[in-house]
Image (cartoon, coloured by chain):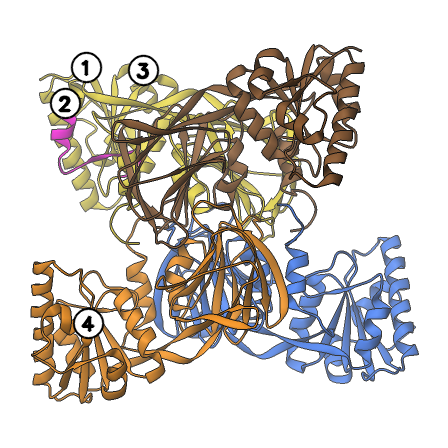
Chain colours: A brown, B yellow, C blue, D orange
Amino acid sequence: MNSTFRHVALIGKYQTPGNREATAASRSLMADIADFLQRRGCEVSLEHDTAHYTGLRDAYPVRTVQDIGRDCDLALVVGGDGTMLGSGRQLAHTGLPLIGINQGRVGFVTDIRLENYQATLAPMLAGEYTREFRSLIQTCVMRGEECVFEALALNDVVVNRGGTSGMVELRITIDGHFMANQRADGLIIATPTGSTAYAMSAGGPILHPSVAGWIMVPIAPHMLSNRPIVLPDSAVVEVTIVAGRDIAANFDMQSLASLQHGDRIVVRRSEHRSCFLHPQGWSYFDTLRQKLHWNEGGQ
Amino acid sequence: MNSTFRHVALIGKYQTPGNREATAASRSLMADIADFLQRRGCEVSLEHDTAHYTGLRDAYPVRTVQDIGRDCDLALVVGGDGTMLGSGRQLAHTGLPLIGINQGRVGFVTDIRLENYQATLAPMLAGEYTREFRSLIQTCVMRGEECVFEALALNDVVVNRGGTSGMVELRITIDGHFMANQRADGLIIATPTGSTAYAMSAGGPILHPSVAGWIMVPIAPHMLSNRPIVLPDSAVVEVTIVAGRDIAANFDMQSLASLQHGDRIVVRRSEHRSCFLHPQGWSYFDTLRQKLHWNEGGQ
Amino acid sequence: MNSTFRHVALIGKYQTPGNREATAASRSLMADIADFLQRRGCEVSLEHDTAHYTGLRDAYPVRTVQDIGRDCDLALVVGGDGTMLGSGRQLAHTGLPLIGINQGRVGFVTDIRLENYQATLAPMLAGEYTREFRSLIQTCVMRGEECVFEALALNDVVVNRGGTSGMVELRITIDGHFMANQRADGLIIATPTGSTAYAMSAGGPILHPSVAGWIMVPIAPHMLSNRPIVLPDSAVVEVTIVAGRDIAANFDMQSLASLQHGDRIVVRRSEHRSCFLHPQGWSYFDTLRQKLHWNEGGQ
Amino acid sequence: MNSTFRHVALIGKYQTPGNREATAASRSLMADIADFLQRRGCEVSLEHDTAHYTGLRDAYPVRTVQDIGRDCDLALVVGGDGTMLGSGRQLAHTGLPLIGINQGRVGFVTDIRLENYQATLAPMLAGEYTREFRSLIQTCVMRGEECVFEALALNDVVVNRGGTSGMVELRITIDGHFMANQRADGLIIATPTGSTAYAMSAGGPILHPSVAGWIMVPIAPHMLSNRPIVLPDSAVVEVTIVAGRDIAANFDMQSLASLQHGDRIVVRRSEHRSCFLHPQGWSYFDTLRQKLHWNEGGQ
């Protein structure tokens, strides 16, 4: 049965250069998957960095993530949740769908096990899949009237204190309405995707991916009544740095901005969403149950 | 300035009969408010029970809540959050807007202080108000193929163990997808309105009223990974009683169903919403800040 | 190598009568263990109920728990944590040491696996063991000047609301000092042993068994600042029922008292402690790590 | 009635230099208190820094904290909890008792209001007081076999990640027994005194000051089962830095150590305790109730 996706891009997990064994394993794995795709009639391109570290630069056409978004019908991400989220964020504006194959334990968004990827992928390539969209946060750091930093987050925006300083004080407004001045180690604004990551460690709830909201979770807040709050994702959240030292904002723990007093982190929903494909019959709750070890009979 | 609401119903807090002083105070207060409304050109009706316990049965036309929904343009609720939520639930299907005047400290939904109600109400009657909708949960308890109990909740649906028995075991499905078997003291499914009530005591987050979701919070769950989860309010949640003794379900802590093994509590969004009016410029965050004592400078 | 314990009592988990297979398995298991002990020179007695349901009444001397405390040097408990805690509570006043063999997964206090019990027990019988003491709570329910109920708890004392009623209100004093009036679903006072049971589900911390304290944890408290508190176990804690309906107190989820307004639950440390023996080199932290799945690499 | 304390030291809150009004107010206040003490027959000394910034260097004998510990019978600390804790830590080894007068709202350890300090102090000076001891943590940072940093903490020892880096990984042993490898933002080890400070923000319980234990609280731990744990204060806790960047340890948020991989933070109970005096009839629970707003009737 041939693929309904004509041109598939392969994206791998970035490996530390110099580890010959890991590189060889990645090369062999990528070649295997490419071969599997070609046998199903797909044209295969290799993502630029993936081609580079696997040494497969000459075996397949190589494309940057930008070109993948333009030229391909599907991206197959082989790695962990981090790789998948990075690719999802980079490709969101193109609408390209992604499938995640996990090399280790199944992740929250990479739900196809490497062991039996062929049996799972075959029907998906033939069009039998469930499509799921994940919303992203578009953030702008304003200094006065100027946007000094811009970033996109599929997991979360985190503002936190420096490692050697006391609490930050943040002033939060929602759509221009004053919400609160919070003193805490920091503040997390997470998407539903990010709700099972850092936000959960800080005491936040799980947000189902189809809830149109963000979860705002203070980190070790001074006041016990500063509870996590779920906000509509249509709202514009503005966080102003009132006090504290060495304050930084990070976005999916990737890009980073160093903040000054008076800086405003302005958070809104991105107009783009990441599109993930899952095997037919997939349920978000199966993933939750597995990742959180529900129903395993013990603590 | 005359009222844009032609016919206003007055609904009071139910008082324990026999307390002469409280009754006299209520009577005097209701007469005051009725007088204020009439001077603004409103026709005033008194809710049946309110008329009864205040002894004002002959002073104003008396209407049941059902008739109020049919005949009036506005309901003015004088009491606490409980009275307001009860009236909101009863009137939701009629679309009648409600205004809440609080006799004690300001509540989450009764945000007009009794002291200066005239100054606050006057512009609202003249049309200067903010309209806010609150979603409700429609619940049906299924025993086999039969619905043995039906209820509407503006705050929450709670399933819990008896006072002298061990944990309940509940099987939860969402839109037919198996989510988890949970062992706990019980389970709360709360609306955004209910998220600041019992659900918060059990560790749930705050849900902004415009988030289209429910928060599901286990009460003292056996497993630490059974975190609160926010579900889209478009989902049908089904909770099946698997094990436990003396299990009951309650709805806004008002109506109550005694449950058997195999009973299924089916939860969906009601097609109706309660409509609350607030003074112009009102913000949900002002209420939160006041009720949760944020920004008071101390713990 | 012979046992340093001359006379060992065997105590089993109570099985539902009528399950022939389970009964036969228990009989065979108990006979095996008894044989193992006799080969090491121990006299073996069977606990009365254990003898009854295994049908081994005529094979070994049978003793009640009371007689075991008087006549034996060691009790070998075969079952789960529940069986161990029950025996520990019953035997605390005698000072008899207990060893726990777990038939299923290892428990918090039954830390010897059934599979290789002989290899683990042999050195313990020869005197190579770690002795550990667990404190107990002695509770008296006072109605007026009369103690209407007395109980001993190795895990916890729990006061909670009925299944169909609202919050309880409890007045708490410590050594006669007023602490707080709490409104909640209930209140748990747990020993270090109980800190990893129900108290943990309600949000309490772990208490190391050698900490001379109780943890008091409110269940779904109305106020967010009603945090769990660790009290010295030398303190006398008094909990008075102020308001609520159908309130009950239970002790290790075994014995139960139905409470009235004005009843006072008076909690003090028992003068007796349970004595558990563990294999040499045993560490409480190994048990914690295993039971709480720390260091398993994932959530 | 004369004082049973012959020689009292006055210690003030450090003020930012240059604020003339604050300095003048402090000077006047200190002179008032000194006068009050002298009228009761006390010799009065001024702490060196306090004398300096109030400009009272020539009005009273000036002593360093070291000399105060040697020469005085009592230290009267005027400021907030921070000042009191700092003085308590510095004077612990001398056994000198401290009394705390709070200039703002009453604190956890500074429980005498400035307004009516004379009425409260008079009987205390005459010998009517309650003495309370607070334990301290003695910490040593080991790099290989060398102790590279030493500090004393009355509140807490905190190890945390840098502001721009991911989680730390810490290996924890208790009395040489391996407890766990934890990945988190950081780890707090707090005394009972510190249990109501940062540790509470991170989700820890309250520890009554007479509990001989520390509370160890992970900050935003990766695993939900990494609960706060109460350890006996007789234990030696060792925390080894396994992974992470820019990791720092701080002690009462005062002194600070920058840490490397392999560094071991060794925590043990100090042989000294701080001694605080309270008005007769004082109860720790009164302070808790006031600071945590228990029993104020609402959330």
Q: Position of residue D77 (x, y in %)?
A: 22, 73
Horizontally, residue C257 falls left or right of residue D118, namely right
Ranked by sequence position, the earlier of labels 3 and 2 is 3
Q: Magenta stretch containing residue D133, yes or no?
A: no
Find out whether the residues at labels 1 and 3 contact each other: C-beta distance under 8 Å.
no
Nearer to us of marks 3 and 2 is 2
Residue tagged 2 = B123
Residue tagged 3 = B70
- As helix, strand or loop, the secondary structure at mark 4 comes to helix
Q: CA distance from mark 1 to mark 4?
A: 72 Å
Nearer to us of marks 4 and 3 is 4
Q: Magenta stretch containing residue B110, yes or no?
A: yes
Residue tagged 4 = D49
Residue tagged 1 = B6
Ranked by sequence position, the earlier of labels 2 and 1 is 1
Pointers 3 and 2 within a single chain: yes
Q: Alpha-carbon neighbours of circle 1 within 10 Å: few (<14), some, or many (≥20)?
A: some
Find out whether the residues at labels 2 and 1 contact each other: C-beta distance under 8 Å.
no
Horizontally, residue B218 falls left or right of residue B114, namely right
Q: Alpha-carbon neighbours of circle 4 within 10 Å: few (<14), some, or many (≥20)?
A: some
Ranked by sequence position, the earlier of labels 1 and 3 is 1
Residue at the (88%, 72%) spot, across then down = C34
Q: Alpha-carbon neighbours of circle 2 within 10 Å: few (<14), some, or many (≥20)?
A: some
